[in-house]
Amino acid sequence: MTGGPVNATATGGVIDLSQSPSIVLGQLSSPSFVTVVSTGGSISGNGGTSVISPSATLSAATGVGSIAVPIVTQVAGLAVSSSGGEIGLINSGDLTLGDVTFGGANAQIGASGTLVATGTVSVSAGNLTLAANNGMVMSNNTVTVSGDLALNSGAGDMGFDGASVFGNNVTLNGNNILVGFTTSTAPTTVSAGTLLTATSAGNLNVLGGANSGANALLEGYNVDLTVGTTAGYLNIDSGLNGATAQISSVSPTTINVYFPNLGSGGYFVNGIEGSITDGGSTGFFAGGAPAVLAQNLIVTYGLAPPLPPPTEPPVTDGGDTTTASGDQVTDNLNTITDINSGPETQGDAGTGGGTPDEKEKKGLPTCK
């Protein structure tokens, strides 16, 4: 089958299109499944919505869509593979991403809704970008990219639940970012061979899971984090039954954390602000050892630090002196006589400074 765009509509079955030459899609519509395979060429779209179906598989030798002209799909589930060229796909609505196999230059897969990756993603050559407008979850799957990996969850949260994610340089952008869930039953790892960069509009959470094996790890040779571009905190929490949680740099020298909307604090280990580790295996680590603040854990702020509370000077009134520390009022005459009531009264002892309100901690978000 060669020539112009291919159009097909199945009213009650599947569409299965396979050939060696390249395929240009018009519109394929099926109530169940669409399969398109080009064993010797590429698959491309024509600018409109090319595939409408609950599920689709697209496979080619020299590319599926392109970065400049992506194929537009309207599917619930998608699997895609190409041994060369580029992959460029945009899905209208929510998308469950199955297996992805790629050996070309650059691949970009996006969804206008939420993207949930459940399949094995293997990029043996080139770079991969996954993007969604309203949230992203890597769920109990493996993502391995030989080049650079960029994940962007748009206005929604980004979550990693029992997933193993690796790339050369890894970039995460999302609203709240959760590496591990408290309900995870398998280990969660997001790792970069060179630089791991993460930027959250809200909280960035690294959370141990529900059993001793459900450890959570956010790791790069070097780590560069920006937390709370709108407002947020960094939370590292161990899980149940011995599960651990770490932010780790393989390099012994560099973990950078920047809070653009804070002037101090902002990072918590097991709920304690300003902690580096919990004394065990949860917390910040560099070169396999607990990180050291201002040496290999560099925390910077976009706002000025809060001013310290003012120191109250001693208050004097004639022969009476009250100290700011709350010492008892001392009268040089030892007694105070109330000419109206007649009896002597003793001055009350001061109590000193009050107890400051505890800093409000923002609750951890739930990624649905």
Image (cartoon, rainbow, N blue to C red):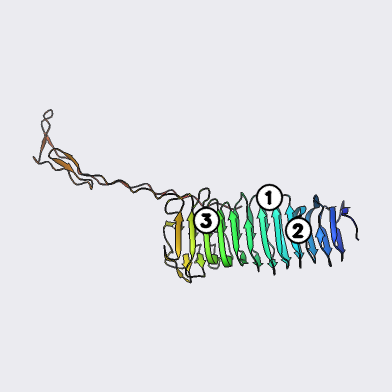
Residue topped by disc 1:
113
Task: Identify which amino acid the numbered label 3 is placed on.
Answer: Thr
Residue topped by disc 2:
66
Task: Identify which amino acid the numbered label 1 is placed on.
Answer: Gly
**Residue extending furthest left?**
333
**Separation of marks 2 and 3 at Cα, in angstroms:** 31 Å
In the image, which is nearer the foreground, mark 2 or mark 3?
2
Residue at the spot x=45%, y=58% of the render? 299
Which mark is first along the chain, 1 or 2? 2
Using the rendered view, name the quadrant where residue 146 is placed.
Answer: bottom right
Horizontally, residue 333 falls left or right of residue 153, namely: left
Q: Which mark is residue 306?
A: none
Q: Residues within 10 Å of mark 1 (few under 14, many from 20)?
A: many
**Residue extending furthest bottom?**
288
**Separation of marks 1 and 3 at Cα, in angstroms:** 25 Å
Residue topped by disc 3:
226
- Between 332 and 84, the residue placed more toward the observer is 84
Residue 272, position as x, y percentages in the image: 42, 57
Which mark is first along the chain, 3 or 2? 2
Q: Residues within 10 Å of mark 2 (few under 14, many from 20)?
A: many
Residue 22, position as x, y percentages in the image: 85, 62
Q: Residues within 10 Å of mark 3 (few under 14, many from 20)?
A: many
Residue 123, position as x, y percentages in the image: 69, 67
Task: Identify which amino acid the numbered label 2 is placed on.
Answer: Ser
Residue 51, position as x, y percentages in the image: 80, 53
**Separation of marks 2 and 1 at Cα, in angstroms:** 21 Å
